[in-house]
Amino acid sequence: MSIRFDLKGSIVYVLLLTACIVFASFFGGLLPFVLLYGILLLLPVSFIYIILNYHYLSVFQELNVHRVVKGEEHKLYISFENRGLLPIHEMELILHSDRCSFSGIGDNESISIEPWNKVKLTPGVVCRYGGTYEIGLKSLGFTDAFGMMKVVFKVPYSFRAIVSPKVTDIANEYLDIENIINSTGSKSTIRREEIPGNEMRDYYPGDPLKAVNWKVSARLSKLTVRIPDKLDTRTVTLILEASNVPERMQDMEYLRRRDYFLEFAVSAVWYFARRGIPVYVIYPAGKITERQVDSYDSFPQFYSDISGGIAYRSDDEKDRMHKLVQERRQAGDGNETRVIITEDEWPGEGFCVVAG
């Protein structure tokens, strides 16, 4: 809760209070003292009225879907119910406009609610950042009848959205595919060499004639073609060292950094998955988790996990991840390429490091 006083209203109040004191001092009697006590009690009575308004107010808000994608518009349902005997006059709606864009409702817009009545709003909302954070209505502002004092309360019921990042190409410039693909290591399940190998199979209509092995075909009395060998790749490991910031300290700088971190991570994994290159991803999902992504089919599960589950269950888990990163930064055996993304290093040069 915070209390703010309007400068003009406060000046008017002080002048009225001074006038009533002078009036009561010089003239005395019932009327001057009634006015004086009325002015003196104006602020405490107004404050009590505001407290009662907030106490008997119910607020509920939710999205029309469980998860959203950054940049997409969805309906936000907000309902207010005044369960008290006192009317709520010109209650100010303070929105999370620093992280969301709204349509159909304005920041600092005011509404009034009669006793035992409900008000429902259905504005559109667009989340600007990937991650998990509170959206919609942030707090409520109540003012006294003369506009001298404003009391701001945190909204009784907040809504925390899971916002999936966009899949873009922002990681491409960091990932040199020529240094990652090698002639030894694991085999790709999709990509093959350009020239035919030693593996054989029967000829099928549509196969290029240059792939036919004529000597083997003559010996077997049937057309036989050579199949290109599976392309060898190095093992690729992507390590996501997320920051560990308590919820109460997650400011706008944190949201911007987490948004870029998530978008970069999913874009990096997509870079490999769409090329059929298996990538082992190590990331915190409560505990340190490892997942292999090697195709279109395995990418959606990783995308779902990272959108709403990047977090550490304890400080010890964060320390383990940091120790793992320090170990993997050292030179390896040559069969593994490690891509280390450190959220706390954004936007510095150490944000994305390719090692191995």
Image (tube, rainbow, N blue to C red):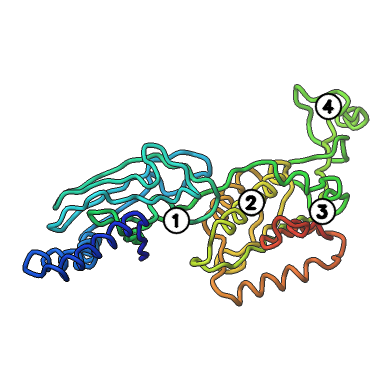
The image shows residue 351, relative to residue 327, as above or below, that is: above
Q: Nearer the viewer, residue 223 or 271?
A: 271
Cα distance, mark 2 to mark 1? 18 Å
Mark 2 / mark 1, whichever is N-terminal:
1
- Counting residues from the N terminus, which is met first, the one under dot 4 or under dot 3? 4
Sequence-wise, the earlier of marks 4 and 1 is: 1
Residue 45 seen from this side: no
Front disc: 4 or 1: 1
- Residue tagged 2: 260
**How far apart are the two marked residues, 4 and 3, measured between alpha carbons?**
35 Å
Q: Where residue 102 sits in the image (x, y, percent)?
A: 43, 41
* Marks 4 and 1, how far apart at CA: 65 Å
The residue that label 1 is drawn on is 134
**Residues at discs 1 and 3 in contact (Cβ within 8 Å):** no
Mark 3 or 2: in front is 2
Measured Cα–Cα span from mark 3 to mark 2: 27 Å
For marks 1 and 3, the one nearer the N-term is 1
Which sits earlier in the primary sequence, circle 2 or circle 4? 4
> Horizontal and vertical percent for residue 231?
82, 44
Q: Are marks 3 and 2 in contact (CB under 8 Å)?
A: no
In-front residue for pair 300/12: 12
Residue 223: which numbered mark, if any?
4
Q: Which mark is residue 234?
A: 3
Mark 1 crowd level (few <14, some 14–19, many ≥20, 10 Å Cα): some
**Type of amino acid under label 4:** Leu
- Which residue is rendered at x = 14% and y = 52% of the image? 115
Instruction: Place residue 11 in its image quadrant.
Output: bottom left
First in sequence: mark 3 or mark 2?
A: 3
